[in-house]
Image (tube, helix red, strand yellow):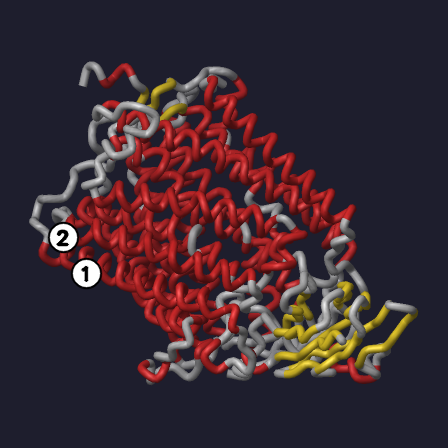
Amino acid sequence: MKVHLYEKAFLWLGAVLLVFCLGALLYASLAHGIHLPDREAEIDPSEVASTPPFDDPGVRQVSGDEYEAVMIGRMWSFEPAEIRVPAGSNVTFVATTTDVLHGLNVEGTRLNMMLIPGQVSRNAYRFREPGEYLIICHEFCGPGHHLMFGKVIVE
Amino acid sequence: MSTLTAFAASVHDRATFRLPEVQQRPLRWSLYIGYAALTAGIFHGLAQALSYANIDILQYFPALRSYYQGLTAHGVANALIFTFSFSNAFLPLMTARALSRTLSPGLLWGSLGSLVAGNILVVFAIVTNRATVLYTSYAPLQAHWTYYLGLVLVVVSTWLAFLAMVLAWRGFKKDHPGENMPLLAHISVASYAMWFLASLPIAVEFLVFLLPWTLGWVEKTDPLMTRTLFWFTGHAIVYAWLLPAYVSWYALVPRQAGGKIVSNTLTKFVFILFLLLSIPTGFHHQYTDPGISTTMKAIHAVLTFGVFFPSLATAFSVMASLEMGGRKAGGKGLLGWIPKLPWGNPSLTAQLLAMITFVFGGITGLINASFTMNQIIHNTTWVPGHFHMTVGSAVALTLMGVAYWMVPYLTGRGLRGRKMALASSWIYSIGVFVFARGMISAGLEGMPRRIYRVQAAYDQEAWNLGGALTGIGGTMMFVGILMFFFVIGVTIFFGRKGGGPTDIPWSETLLTPHESRWSKSFDRIGFWMIVAIVLIVIAYGPFFATYLPPNFVSPGFRFF
């Protein structure tokens, strides 16, 4: 295939740039421990209230600065609607939904997950700065979607 | 002409070839449906943009039951109906002209009939508030069966259009053994070949999962499975919208700008790469989903970066074609060729502006694909900010630009309102930049997409500037489309009879087709479709192998 010299140079530069970006991505996720929700567990959405750990939603201390926040999303609220943790806590969110898809986005952090019926979502974030963080449902879940929110209060 | 024949044509026969009127008519109506859908969809688009600026105009939409009903209409009309109605007309026409062959009239009318029937069902479902599920149709939100069946029929219309193209392609190959396939036909067929493969998962989602479920034949469905099938099609769908625009940029824009297509073979190679790489990338829409392993997400991240590569090649080739035109018109220096381009041609200007917005659409797309950053912006207004610079301008503006020659070509009426057409493109593209700047910056501050901000139970001061820019830019976009609609309407009814162009603006290539075995293989689209299927199996197989059988847990929810 005949390719003009300038075009060849441009394409090589582009390819190198893309590989460099992928390298940066790999570095960021490994060196800074930025994880995505993975395969966690399946759950029957109609049995959420009686399935551990969702039979007891809320935040609890696991050890030292490790906390676990068990949350349920449903039309159109989060349970619990508010969680409190001390500054510096590493909070693992374990969440699911009893009805339709919801989102769980903690504003101002990279904690951002989908709640999908039948699946358990899990991801962690360390809250270093005290303050109030909005939790917003960011996936359309019916006419009251824009009323669905919660709060993380870091003290 | 004698000096021109030194260059290869992107069509088989330089002498003009026209489809008989009975075949042009369904293409023309398909095109009209597309532009009507574009215009219908923007009214609620305006309401959404203003809602983000905290201005509520929904009270002036008495027929609407909710913001989300209008949001569904906006997404379906502008992202699905507009784009595919256009492609159903444009790609078969390009194929027929490039091959100088007629198409099967039965298939063209069948395609139009399926499109019309699909539209009637979908419009019924949405207007009567039976399908307020947004265009992503995530189960277990459950729409009326007419909505799913209507969208299936829209997909079927694309299959019939594709089949008409394939028959012409095969017929030509049989009659011209060993000949290089005309470039314009190759890239048109490759575009819909990609879409045909890409459309199969959503067909399975709607026919196997959602229709039996909404009809009550099965009680429960699997939300993760159906969502995965949606995005299996759903990323490739954006390339299905984009590739017809690329066909115009590669094969038509050079002539309009006074330049040439750089390379026949490289252009074919780029479209083969799109055929291979567009589909196995869908998990990058599901980075924040549970139930999908990080390994699968990482593989799709790499492939998503891969599909950026043919777009880079496109950027170079198209820019080179434009530079040739600008220099021939007397442009000097590094950038002096740009003002020398024929900016007075509304068809070209719309597409040049589309290309400029697409630079930013592409860059923001790479950010979406980077899963570390994706967690910051997933489902915030960043995402619509991004895709209004891809489908909302690179595609939409190109399709509007094509209308400025294609509607006159198909109706035989000269374009009326050239200055208004030019103004429309400028207002629209400046509007897109203001709008996207607003959505992107507010998205970085966490403003969620798909919410009725005016009535939201929460709000942040940090969203105000971005929200206001969204409202201003969105209003400009709205005005731009209304002007476009006016120009097209006036052209159809009052354009000078016999004033339309007699041929499409096909271009010549600078480098003649290369005769190596490798480059000749690009004409074997069927073979490359099989390679694409192998790649898809590699990229999606492990997920399905470990996930199946489906997890049928969710009854339908109808809360409209």
- On screen, residue B389 above or below B190: below
Residue at 34%, 39% (x, y): give it.
B248
Q: Amino acid at mark 2?
A: Gly
Q: Residues within 10 Å of mark 2 (few under 14, many from 20)?
A: some
Quadrant for the N terminus of chain B, please.
top left
Q: Is residue B430 above or below residue A92?
A: above
Identify the mark nearer the N-term, 2 or 1: 2
The image position of residue A65, as x and y in percent, is 87, 68
Residue B532 at x, y percent in the picture: 59, 39
* Residue at 50 percent of width and 48 percent of height: B196
Above or below: residue B449 compared with residue B82: below
B77 sits to left or right of B487:
right
B93 in relation to B226, above or below: above
Front in this rendered view, residue B169 or B388: B388
Question: How far from the left and from the top, in percent, is residue B484?
Answer: 23, 57
Q: Residues within 10 Å of mark 1 (few under 14, many from 20)?
A: some
Identify the residue at image location x=44%, y=66%: B465
Which chain letter goes with mark 2? Answer: B
Give the Cα distance between marks 2 and 1: 9 Å
Spot occupied by residue A127 in the image (x, y as percentages of width and height): 75, 66
Image quadrant where residue B432 sits: bottom left
Q: Are marks 2 and 1 in contact (CB under 8 Å)?
A: yes
Give the side of residue B532 with respect to residue A27, left or right.
Answer: left
Does the image show residue B106? no
Residue kind at label 1, given as amino acid type? Phe
Q: Is residue A144 visible?
A: yes
Residue at the spot of label 2: B417
Residue identifier under label 1: B486
Q: Which is nearer the eye, A11 or B119?
A: A11
Q: Secondary structure at mark 2?
A: loop
